[in-house]
Amino acid sequence: MIPENTSQALDPKYIAVIISSIIAVFGWLISSYINTRTFKRNETSKLKDKISSMVESFFDSLEEKIKSRSVKETELDDLIAGKLTLIELHLNHLDRKINIKLISDEHINKIRSEPYDYLTSSNGDYRKKLNELKFNTLELIEENYTEWYFRNSTKYHWLKFKSLILQK
């Protein structure tokens, strides 16, 4: 025979099941958030490293071309257009997917135009200027990535949330 429950309160067993289910769902949500965020950071880091190596390769190829001194402007144009277009493609993909701009359009235009000035430079002068442009570009990539990384950190969001609450 089933005992009758005259009380309107829930049985403690059901309460325990409901609470543990809520805790499990909450844990899954937190775990999913952390996993998604880690995946996004890892993917961004991998793409940033790929872009950096493509930039290095571009400048190395450019230096080799300019070093020959018999290079024609059309050959230089073909090299710049081909390799820089691939770099821009990856930069645009990263910008659309993750909303991070590693190299500004102005800097891309500078990379596109300055090597033509190096064709008329004295023998060793072009190498110094080209290396300076290369390292400035790589530094810009790292700075923008670092800024994005810390802007998307938990600590940053926590401090932003805390300052929002304290303002009210």
Image (tube, helix red, strand yellow):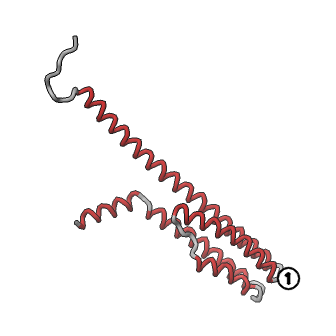
Residue 118, horizontal then vertical, whole percent: 73, 85
Q: Secondary structure at mark 1?
A: loop
Q: Is residue 132 visible?
A: no
Whole-percent x, y for residue 156 in the image: 38, 62
Left or right of residue 17, residue 7 in this image: left
Single out the residue that lies furthest toward the right.
Answer: 70
Q: Residue furthest top?
A: 1
Q: Residue 29's image quarter?
A: top left
The C terminus, quarter of image: bottom left
Please provide percent x and percent y for residue 103: 58, 72
Most foreground residue, 89 or 158: 89
Residue 91 in view in this figure: yes
Depth check, front residue: 96 or 56: 96
Q: Residue at x 24, y 67 (%)?
A: 167
Residue in the image at 77% along x and 89% along y = 120
Q: As displayed, is residue 153 above or below residue 167?
A: above
Q: Position of residue 59 (x, y in %)?
A: 71, 73
Residue located 23% across and 27% down the image: 12
* Front residue of this view, candidates 147 and 125: 147
Vertical position of residue 65 compared to residue 6: above or below: below
Q: Which residue is mark 1?
A: 70
Mark 1, Cα crowd under 10 Å, few <14 / some 14-19 / many 20+, is: few
